[in-house]
Image (cartoon, rainbow, N blue to C red):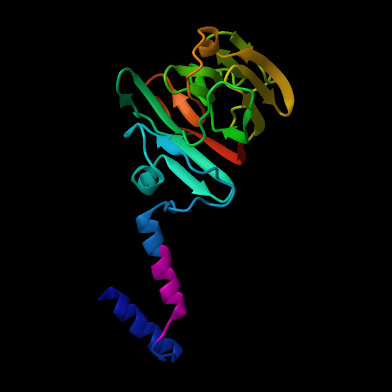
Amino acid sequence: MKKYIVYFFSCFVLLNCSGGDSNNDVLEEEQEQEEQGNIIPLIPNEGIPSPFNLFTVIDDDVERKDFNSVSKWYEEFANKQIFKLFTGDEFVGERKHARTEAGQGLKWKQGTEWHTFEATMTPSGKLNETYTIAQLFAGCCGPQLRVEVRSSGRINVGSRANGNIRISTDEDWATGTKSFKIKIRSNGKDMEVYFNDELKFTGISEESTFGNIDALYHFRWGVYSNNKMIKNLSNTVTNITRE
């Protein structure tokens, strides 16, 4: 009723009662979009790798057709993904953790063909412990390497078979305003990580040291914490290549 009173009043004052008001239509459309929240399309936005699934705090394997059920934690635009976690978030499975990550889609076994994940990343902040923003993952057996944000804001690579080393310059890269480029390359056995186009890490996957030639590898990226979230955190990812 209030809407029609306002509309009648505006018609009376402006003497414009032609029966249509495009401004009102636009406002109603915008309000409807706000009420619906972040809408993730069934067809990926331009520049977004396809396909991939989402691993989140409320469901450990979400297909694109169901992405809107987890849109609180994931936003997608042309050439941009935003992965989010919030205070109190926790997934209780085999072990407790909190994550919003993209993964699956492209899988391969150990061989001569190299695969690449490359993206520009902007973490919004730091935790009191390390958290992960990208991984080379073996579906059977867990992460073969992790790109990590340390509590100092430095960027490290951790790997079961190769130890843990810093790959960034000695400064805080997790201020929410500084971006950096990460590139991971692997053929299932050999692994490389680049920071801002400089090769900073080489190693071999743990599964290859065990002679596991049947392991299926894939990339994951987003934000992953080993514990319940004590603050809001996000990772904005752009310029994404996965091949």
Magenta region, residue range: 20-30
Residue 33, quarter of picture: bottom left
Q: Where is residue 193 shown, x and y percent of the image?
A: 65, 22
The front one of 83 and 102 is 102
Q: Is residue 25 above or below residue 78?
A: below
Q: Quadrant of the N terminus?
A: bottom left
Question: Which secondary structure class fits the magenta region best?
Answer: helix
What residue appears at the point 67 percent right and 18 percent down from the top-left corner? Answer: 167
Question: Outermost residue toward the left?
Answer: 1
Question: Outermost residue toward the right?
Answer: 198
Q: Where is residue 164 shown, x and y percent of the image?
A: 59, 10
Q: Is residue 201 above or below residue 69?
A: above
Q: Is residue 233 above or below residue 75?
A: above
Residue 119, quarter of picture: top right
Q: Is residue 55 above or below residue 189?
A: below
The front one of 215 and 24 is 215
Q: Where is residue 56 shown, x and y percent of the image?
A: 38, 33
Count of marks placed on residues: 0
Q: Quadrant of the C terminus?
A: top right
What residue appears at the point 74 percent right and 24 percent down from the top-left corner? Answer: 198
Answer left or right for 11 relative to 119.
Answer: left
Asked whether the viewer can see residue 228, the reply is: no
Asked whether the viewer can see residue 65, the reply is: yes
